[in-house]
Amino acid sequence: IKNMLTDCRDIAMQYSPNNLIFYVSLVDGGTLELIRGLGKNVVSSGDLVAQFEATLNAEQIQSHFAARDAIDSITAEAFKEIGPRARSGAATEHAMQQWFLEAFRRENLVTDDPPIVAVNANSGNPHYEPHAGNSSRIREGDFVLLDVWAKKDTPGAVYYDITWICYVGKSPSDRMREIFHTVRQARDIGVETVQTAVSAGRPIAGWEVDRAVRTFINESGYGGNFIHRTGHSIGTDVHANGANMDDLEIHDERRILPNSCFSIEPGIYLPEFGVRSEVNMLVRLGSAEVTGKIQHEIVTV
């Protein structure tokens, strides 16, 4: 090893100072001691890992768009299904989840886990997953969260991952509207933070996006109800190895790289219901775009 590294000063390794970004901090302490003992400066390979594992080629970007087209269409169909099913007494979270999976099969989509269909208090738990044995019925007057992610069943395909909200009835409550509008504004602040930096050619790290979003939610009085990071890297895995929009779980200093994809998905979670609004962004040299439809109001079904 000493001979191999003779002409090297800085050595990039899967290491993060103080285990700050534990996703890439994989090298054991003994190996770090060995390399440093040779007089070398060990630096984190976090951005290199993201460059090789979480940036997309043209074909992968098109696969993301193909998944987008299919999932946006399926989700619009789901809204047409939920209302009539709820009024006939045939709607449950699990039944709608299975409806999504059948639609995925029809559109040649695959996913690592089934979508989330969460009603009322269940939507206030960001980790909720419906199963046949614990599924709530969906009725008139219910608040429903749909978190849907999948990719085309082709080699190298990239995920598309969204969350939308609907209400079974004609008019959501003022409280529902208030929370949704707060989350919507926070989401848009996240999008604008990325777009402003990228269009100006300024490097931006994942933590900066989270901080901008979290500051707004804190100032709105709901900081204690926003209990997860703002977004995650998206690639051939729905949670990929690029920068996450995170200043909560970790202080993610990895840069948002050109040709990378990620989610913006702030949420406010209350005992009676929870709101999350999720979009995907694609960054290119000099520009950043939301790749799919954007929810502006609660959908009524």
Image (spheres, rainbow, N blue to C red):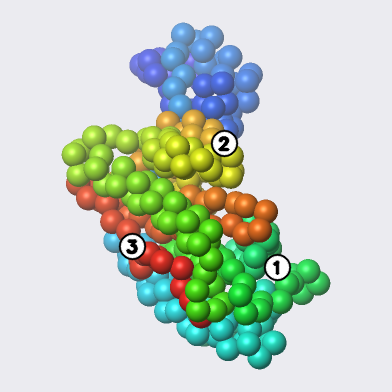
Instruction: Please say if 77 is above or below 148.
Output: below
Give the SS element for disc 3.
Answer: loop
Image quarter of residue 140: bottom right
How far apart marks 2 and 3 lie (CA) works out to: 26 Å
Residue drawn at (52%, 51%) of the image: 267
The local crowd at label 1, few if under 14, some if 14 to 19, many if 20 or more residues have their Cα within 10 Å, is many
Q: CA distance from mark 3 to mark 1?
A: 28 Å
Which of the 4 quarters of the picture holds residue 64?
Answer: bottom left
Q: First in sequence: mark 2 or mark 3? A: 2
Q: What residue would you read off at disc 3?
A: 291
Name the residue beneath numbered marker 1.
Answer: 130
**Residue at the bottom extreme?**
88
Q: Residues within 10 Å of mark 3 (few under 14, many from 20)?
A: some
Let me know if residue 93 appears in the view. yes
Q: Is residue 242 left or right of residue 25?
A: left
Q: Is residue 26 above or below residue 81?
A: above
Tell which tag, 3 or 1, sits nearer the viewer: 1
Between 25 and 169, the residue placed more toward the observer is 169
- Residue 215 vertical placement versus 262 (above, below): above
Please, what is the three-letter code of the amino acid marked with disc 2? Glu
